[in-house]
Image: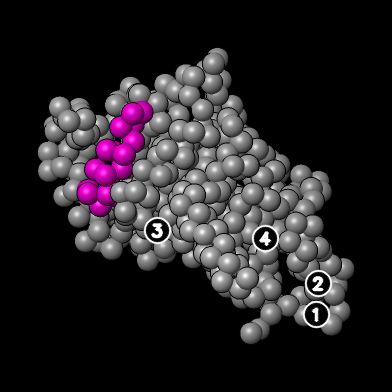
C-alpha cells in the first residue's frame, strides 16, 4: 500500500513537472531594466544599445538595481533557408550574440522582442510556426528575457500561443524571463501565472500623465488611465507573476512632479520597472527619480505584494503596500492641480489589508519609525502626527516600520 502511494505521488510530481510550462524561480521580484520602445521605436542599432548599457552603469542605474537591457521591435533581419531568424545586418553588424556578450560583460542581462503572430506590430518576422527555432536561437545568443507581442494574430488564441512559446523556451534550456504582451485582452492575470513571469494589463502607455491617445481602432493610455486599470488586479500578482502596466515614461519630458508620481505609483503596484528613456542623456532630476533606492526597495520588496489604494480624500489618494518584516509603504498622492496639506494622526491608524489580512497598527502602544522615501531620510516616529503639504500632482512616500 505504502509503495503504491509513493509511486502514485512520484507519478503526480513527474506529471506536474511535465505540465509546468515556464521556468520557475525567475523574476521573484518585478523585473527591472530598460527597453528601447518608448524612446527609440524603430531606431535601434547595436551602437545605441551598447551605449545604453554603458550609461546604465555610469549613471548609477545598475547600482540601483536595474538589470535588463531589452531591444524591442525592429532588430530583425530575415529568416535563413532553414528558418532561423537573424538580425538586420546593417544595424546589428556584429550580431546579437556579440551584443548579448557585451551586455553580460557589464554585469547586466539581455532581452529581446518577438510576437506570437507571423508579423510583429512593426511588420517584422514574428515567431508563429517558428517558436522552437526562435527559442533555440535566443538561448544560443544568450537572451535572458523575451517580450512576446500579439500583432497579426487573427484566429489565434492567447491561451494556446503563449504556452507554445513558454514550452519552447523551456525546451531550449536557458532560463529566460517570459513577458506576455497581449494588452490584457484575454485577462492573462487569470491564466498566465503558469505560462510567463509578467503580463501587460493594458494597452500601450502614452507619454502623458492624464490623457488617452485615441487612434480609432486602438488607444494608448496616460499614466493615470493605466494605473486605474492595473490597480484592480492586485490579487493576481506575486513573486514570479507580475501585472505589467507597461514601461516607464520617466525622463521623456514629463515634469518632475508627475514623473515622481508615475514612478511611485509603479513602485506601489509592484510593477516591472522598465525605463523607457534615453539613459545617455538624462538630467539630474531624471536620474534621481529613476535611481531612488528607497522607492526601488518598495517595488522590489521580497513579499511581492501589489499595493492598494486605501482612500481618497479631497483629491489626495492614500496608498499602502505591505512590506517584509511587518513594514509598510505609504503613499499620499495629490491628484489635484493645487497643493494639499495632509495630517496623519497615527494614534488613529489601524488598517487591515483585506487581501492579505496584514494589519498596520500605529495606535498608542505601537510606535513605529518613519522614513521619508523621497527625501531619503528618517523623520522620527508615529508619536507625533505627521503634517505635510504635497505640491500639485506630486507624492509623499513613507516607510512605516519597527526596529528589528
Ligand atoms: C506593441 C507593444 C509595444 C511595442 C510595440 C512594438 O504595440 O504593446 O510595447 O512592443 O508593439 O511594435
The residue at the point 78 percent across, 68 percent down is: 359
Image disc number at residue 274: none
Judged from the image, the secondary structure of the residue bearing numbered disc 1 is loop
Q: Is residue 73 left or right of residue 90?
A: right
Query: Whole-Å distance between the Cαs marked 4 and 2?
Result: 14 Å
Discs 1, 4 touching: Cβ within 8 Å: no
Asked whether the residues under the numbered discs 2 and 1 touch, taking CB atoms below 8 Å apart as contact, a structural biologist would say yes
Alpha carbon distance from label 1 to label 4: 18 Å
Q: Residue beneath label 4, please?
A: 321
Where residue 361 is drawn, which disc sits there? 2
- The disc, 3 or 4, on the residue closer to the chain's N-terminal end is 3
Q: Residues within 10 Å of mark 2 (few under 14, many from 20)?
A: some
Q: Is residue 62 magenta?
A: no
What residue is at 70 percent from the left and 53 percent from the top? 308
- The crowding category of the residue bearing disc 1, from other C-alpha atoms within 10 Å (few below 14, some 14 to 19, many at least 20), is some
On-image quarter of the N terminus: bottom right
Which one is earlier in the sequence, the residue at label 2 or at label 1? 2
Amino acid at each position: 500500500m505504502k509503495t503504491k502511494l509513493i509511486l502514485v505521488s512520484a507519478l503526480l510530481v513527474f506529471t506536474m513537472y511535465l505540465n509546468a510550462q515556464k521556468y520557475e524561480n525567475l523574476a521573484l521580484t518585478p523585473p527591472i531594466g530598460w527597453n528601447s520602445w518608448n524612446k527609440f521605436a524603430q531606431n535601434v542599432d547595436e551602437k545605441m544599445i551598447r551605449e545604453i548599457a554603458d550609461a546604465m552603469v555610469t549613471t548609477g542605474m545598475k547600482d540601483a538595481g536595474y538589470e535588463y537591457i531589452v531591444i524591442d521591435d525592429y532588430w530583425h533581419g530575415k529568416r535563413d533557408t532553414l528558418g532561423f531568424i537573424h538580425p538586420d545586418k546593417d544595424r546589428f553588424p556584429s550580431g546579437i550574440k556579440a551584443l548579448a556578450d557585451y551586455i553580460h560583460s557589464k554585469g547586466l542581462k539581455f532581452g529581446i522582442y518577438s510576437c506570437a503572430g507571423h508579423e510583429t506590430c512593426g511588420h517584422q518576422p514574428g515567431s508563429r510556426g517558428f517558436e522552437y527555432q526562435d527559442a533555440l536561437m535566443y538561448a544560443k545568443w544568450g537572451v535572458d528575457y523575451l517580450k512576446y507581442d500579439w500583432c497579426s494574430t487573427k484566429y489565434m488564441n492567447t491561451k494556446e500561443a503563449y504556452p507554445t512559446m513558454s514550452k519552447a523556451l523551456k525546451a531550449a534550456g536557458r532560463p529566460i524571463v517570459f513577458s506576455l504582451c497581449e494588452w490584457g485582452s484575454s485577462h492573462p492575470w487569470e491564466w498566465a501565472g503558469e505560462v510567463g513571469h509578467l503580463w501587460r494589463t493594458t494597452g500601450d502607455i502614452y507619454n502623458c500623465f492624464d490623457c488617452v491617445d485615441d487612434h480609432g481602432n486602438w488607444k494608448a493610455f496616460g499614466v493615470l488611465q493605466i494605473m486605474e486599470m492595473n490597480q484592480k488586479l492586485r490579487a493576481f500578482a506575486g513573486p514570479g507573476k507580475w501585472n505589467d502596466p507597461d514601461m516607464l515614461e520617466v525622463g521623456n519630458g514629463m515634469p518632475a512632479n508627475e514623473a515622481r508620481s508615475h514612478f511611485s505609483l509603479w513602485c506601489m503596484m509592484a510593477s516591472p520597472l522598465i525605463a523607457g528613456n534615453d539613459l545617455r542623456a538624462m538630467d539630474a532630476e531624471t536620474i534621481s527619480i529613476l535611481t531612488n533606492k528607497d522607492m526601488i526597495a518598495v517595488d522590489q520588496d521580497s513579499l511581492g505584494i501589489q499595493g492598494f489604494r486605501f482612500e481618497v480624500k479631497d483629491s489626495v489618494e492614500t496608498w499602502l503596500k505591505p512590506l517584509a518584516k511587518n513594514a509598510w509603504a505609504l503613499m499620499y498622492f495629490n491628484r489635484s492641480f493645487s497643493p494639499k496639506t495632509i495630517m496623519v494622526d497615527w494614534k488613529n491608524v489601524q488598517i487591515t489589508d483585506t487581501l492579505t489580512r496584514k494589519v498596520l497598527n500605529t495606535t498608542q502602544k505601537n510606535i513605529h519609525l518613519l522614513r521619508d522615501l523621497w527625501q531619503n531620510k528618517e523623520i522620527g516616529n508615529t508619536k507625533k502626527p505627521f503634517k505635510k503639504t504635497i505640491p500639485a500632482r506630486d507624492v509623499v512616500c513613507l516607510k512605516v516600520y519597527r526596529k528589528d
